[in-house]
Amino acid sequence: MSLRIVAIADTHYAAGSLELCGARRSAIADILLLRAVRRVNRFIKPDLTVVLGDLVDDGSRDGLERLKPIIDLLDSPCIIIPGNHDGDLDTFYSVYPHPPECLDIKGVRVVTFVDREEPGYNARRSKADVARMGRARSGHDGPILSLQHVPLFPPGASASPYGYTNAPAVWSAFARNNFTLALSGHWHAGDDLAQRGAVIVPALCEAPFAFMEITIEGDRVETRRHELALPRDLQLIDCHVHTQFAYCSENMDMTVALGLAREYGLAGISLTEHSGQLYFDADTFWGASFLRDGIETRHGRSNRMPAFLDQAGRQRPPALIGLEIDCDDCGRPVVRAEDMARVDVRIGAIHWLQELRKPEPDYDAAAEEMLGRLSKFLSSGIRILAHPLRLFRGCPDHMPPGLIPRLTDILREHGVAAEINFHNQETQPEFVRACIESGVKMAFGSDAHNLCEIGEFYPHLELMRRCGLTAADLKRALLPDFEGVRW
């Protein structure tokens, strides 16, 4: 039996303007935490998540309350301990539950310590808590995990400038009672000493915004470092970032998006908006009533296209400007030619099929309808096909087996790239392999509707790794650089 843990430390949230300056990104710490929580829930799925203190930078109750709903989104059980920046303990525990002194989960005993702060940002473990380390072994012959904020590690094993003023006594109790792992935060650089019994989790608030995944199985401890920022050497571009003009925006803002994109390690982004949402009101768009007559639809007109193009064009540093161009029922692009000519990135999208809107759809007929539309639509100047198989995400077992090769044939014929997109969907390895074998280029898109999603290419890169692509292979497989996009 193994226990998988995610450990997050030192978010250091502080309210204020989203100015991205200084090493500690306190003003965007809530966005970073939400990015981490979403990745943890969807892709890591741990048995336990621990938050190791310094949630806020200034000890404010408002800050603690701001992060609470984000932490509450975690699907796994969660232990939250305070750090030296989190203010007085009474206030902290009025917002967050008091951490359990001891928790047994999947054969691992988790023991929590909240130690007294000492000068120099150190700590001291009380005699009572040192004694509690001995009692933790009583009646338990499996692994024991010690949680604390200030780093606990074997004497001389880490360069951490912080530790315990009574470190020899604490580590002696750790070793004497055969603890398996000490898991701490506080030192922002972090240190992976898992093979020596300690992991200091790096700070989420400092680039590259890392947290740790730890698996404990008997005496064996394995770690994996996760980073919310992308490897800058990959020079990745997010071709699909929505804005405040989207009806489906959660908190998007063009200016903030550009700043975050740089923080996340992107080489550039395209501010890309739904054409149907820019031309029609929300009821008309979501009701899909514009699909019959397309751009000529008269009902529900609400032309916000000029405002979008103007505001996107005034962003500094400059971003690419894109449109996610809807496809009407006849395979025509829902966009005016003069507007299409003004954008850098033209992404085509089919959001509805008539067949799939029936109570009992015929999936073979739906595939034929989609391919038929694409045969015309992709010849209209589209460069990238958004979320190519998303229409079948709710019915993958019914997706016709010949759909992927026929789709890649159409993409190759028209010289259109396939977007790799994980927004509310999965992208199958067989589709990636088919694109590579057919010579169809790919493009990474986050389809971000929340600021935390911009450039969230963790699943994209994991998929490429599963398909056997190296960094060099990836560069060849993706669309060539967009002109003028790099910062």
Image: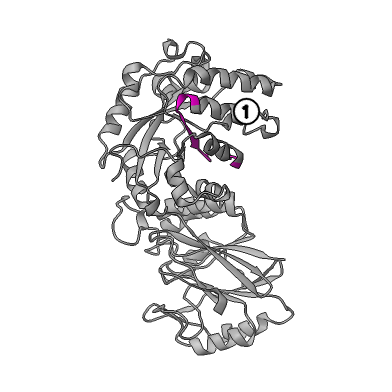
The residue positioned 42% from the left and 14% from the top of the image is 295
Quadrant of the rendered structure where residue 145 is?
bottom right
Vertical position of residue 212 compared to residue 119: above or below:
above
Q: Nearer the viewer, residue 10 or 230?
A: 230
Left-right relation of 40 to 2: left
* Image position, residue 167 (x, y; %): 49, 86
In this figure, which residue is indicated by the disc labeled 1? 403
Which residue corresponds to the image point at 36% horizontal and 58% vertical from the top-left?
A: 26
Nearest the eye: 253 or 348: 348
Q: Position of residue 420 (x, y in %)?
A: 50, 39
Q: Is residue 443 left or right of residue 303?
A: right
Q: Closest to the observer: 139 or 415?
A: 415
Asked if the stretch drawn in magenta spans residue 417, the answer is: yes
Where 144 sits versus 239, above or below? Answer: below
Q: Please, what is the three-letter code of the amino acid marked with disc 1?
A: Leu
Give the extent of the magenta segment.
Answer: 413-429
Q: Position of residue 326 (x, y in %)?
A: 46, 22
Magenta span contains residue 379: no
Check disc 1 and report its element: helix, strand or loop.
helix
- Residue 116's x, y, as percent? 47, 79
> Which residue occupies 47% across, 47% down?
473
User: Could you say which is closer to the camera, residue 193 or residue 93?
Assistant: 193
Q: Quadrant of the N terminus?
A: bottom right
